[in-house]
Amino acid sequence: MRQLRRDASTSRGAKAPRFGRHDGSVWGKLARTSVGAGAMIQFLQSLVDGLMIGSAYALLALGFTLIFGVLRRLNLAYGSSILVGAFAGAAVFAQWKLGGWAVAAATLAAAVVAGIYVERLCFWAMRKGAAIASMVSSFAVWMQLEELLALLFPERTLSFPAVVERSVFVLGPFQFRTEYVAMFALAALLMAGLEWTMRATRFGLAVRAVTEHPEAARAMGVPVARIAFWAFVVASAIGGAAAYLMAAAEEQVTLHSGMQLTFTGLVAMMIGGIGSLRGAVLGGLMLGVVETLAQAHLGASGRELAAFGLLFLLLVLRPGGLLAQDFAARDAAALRRV
Amino acid sequence: MLEIADIVTAYGKIEALKGVSLKVEPGKITCLLGPNGAGKTTLMMTVAGILKPRRGSVRFEGRELASAAPRRIVESGIALVPENRLVFPNMTVAENLAAGAFTRSDSAGIAEDIARVYARFPRLQERSSQAAGTLSGGEQQMLAVARALMVRPKLLLMDEPSVGLAPLVVEEIFRIIRDLNRDGTTIFLVEQNAHMALQVAHYFYLLELGKVTFSGAPGQIAEDEVIQRAYLGSKK
């Protein structure tokens, strides 16, 4: 993932002299005539890049928030379980030189299997109300899965097939990188699919009911444990898709990106508001934009500084996240209206 | 219709119900009164299958339901209107009703029942695409009742439907309870508002500290004494 972001910064500004300020187009002339306009275009370019990277973050946050919503427990093994998926995809690629769908299928399948392992061990087996035990054991499983990958893949960094051939195309004053556009398009498609599932299917209805009031859902005959299991499976598949898209964009996968995946998903979820699916999308996109802007203006070290600064600021100003699920306040408001 | 015999339900070592026995007759409104902490909600949750009793039996139309899964209990014709309503606040009114019908798969029948509850509660129809969290307290209580009606229950368990509502709204809720009963639904009602409850109940039980201490028809003892004991427990 580090690689991915470094690439993002090289695609614009001074390191890509063929485009932007120095090219012969109308936009280039405009950029030359005023420094302000150039800065504006650079800002907008960062915005575009950030939204594209942010779409993958949004997927991670969606997986996190889906699990948290249904179980009210934090799954710290999330990043490492989907990393298992990415490594499985890379192994299929290395072994049989298969690309595209085969690698995507292997990534998703292995992420789901690892997710089920985490769910059975850290969540299903734990007693009700043992949220801390679940979190701590998911931390243990995180370490366990990473060590397992280190054992199986001593080289620690594997190459990954791209979704589309890397190139850059220009639209107006902006440059678009094909692998980002593909990532954004596929992520958007997945999010639309998830939104539809949550709105229009019986399963989605049950997941939302369990997220809002597990006791009431149980009283209506919703099998809460089974819904939690399937929500975990869906979240793992979404996480697997995010890992696939990110690995395909940077054409490699490394062992230490497990932690990055966990933190990115966690931060994006908390920015948007824990338990809110729209919040997760918003948080992911926002994190992508802020990171890209910080990278452009402050360099690599500024990126994480900005990400955690944003989280800190939001936690102080809006502790529940941007789209906080403040049921208690809403109930009180309803009582006042009577 | 519903026979509860010697039910013991415990939270860890603390027994909230210490051998409760009572009966709900078909077609009637049976009311359970008692002070805070008497175990009223625990009994409702036990009947609904959300809490598992340590011992005792819950028989509904002759079938044993103690420790049965909530789904089976719902399918046998018992629906719960939970304490504090617990409507799904970010889901629309229509989605709340659909969630109430989760155990059913006959979409034509579900659509018919949605039309039926809208006819009973026109205000819910007006707000069908509004998020349930934006409704007033009284409307939320109506929605909680409507949601429970989506499984066409023979027995409706209502856990403190009047709590937190303004007096006029409470009267409306009790009118709804009476209407539902007149239309053939048996009702088992837990209430703090003893005065209102005694007006609609055909029979009532007093629950104190996990035990039934009195039962009878309203009028069998002075309302003052019932209210005294329902709010404060017995004088000793």
Image: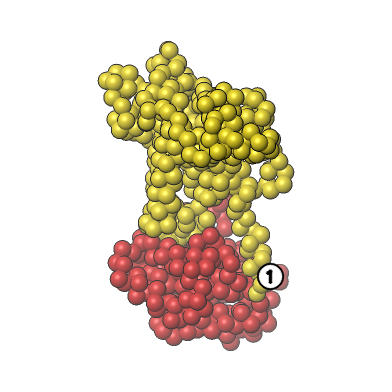
Chain colours: A yellow, B red
Q: Residues within 10 Å of mark 1 (few under 14, many from 20)?
A: few
Q: Nearer the viewer, residue B191 or B122?
A: B122
The picture places residue B42, in percent across and down from the top left corner, at: 54, 61
Q: Look at label 1 and name its amino acid.
A: Arg
Which residue is farthest top?
A: A154
Q: Is residue A262 above or below residue A278?
A: above
Q: Does the rendering let one see residue A142?
A: no
- Tell me the quarter of the picture where residue A188 sits: top left
Tell me what residue is drawn at x 69 percent, y 76 percent.
B228
Q: Chain of mark 1?
A: A
Q: Does the rendering let one see residue B10?
A: yes
Q: Nearer the viewer, residue A323 or B162?
A: A323
- The mark total stands at 1
Tell me what residue is drawn at x 50 percent, y 61 percent.
B91
The picture places residue A3, in percent across and down from the top left corner, at: 52, 23
Q: Quadrant of the C terminus of chain A?
A: bottom right
Q: Nearer the viewer, residue A156 or A212?
A: A156
Q: Nearer the viewer, residue B209 or A37?
A: A37
- Looking at the rendered structure, the secondary structure element under dot 1 is helix
The picture places residue A310, in percent across and down from the top left corner, at: 67, 38
Identify the residue position indicated by label 1 in the image: A336
The picture places residue B28, in percent across and down from the top left corner, at: 45, 81
Residue A300 in the figure: left or right of residue A173: right
Tell me what residue is drawn at x 45 percent, y 68 percent.
B94
- Tell me the quarter of the picture where residue A242 sits: top left
Tell me what residue is drawn at x 45 percent, y 60 percent.
A219
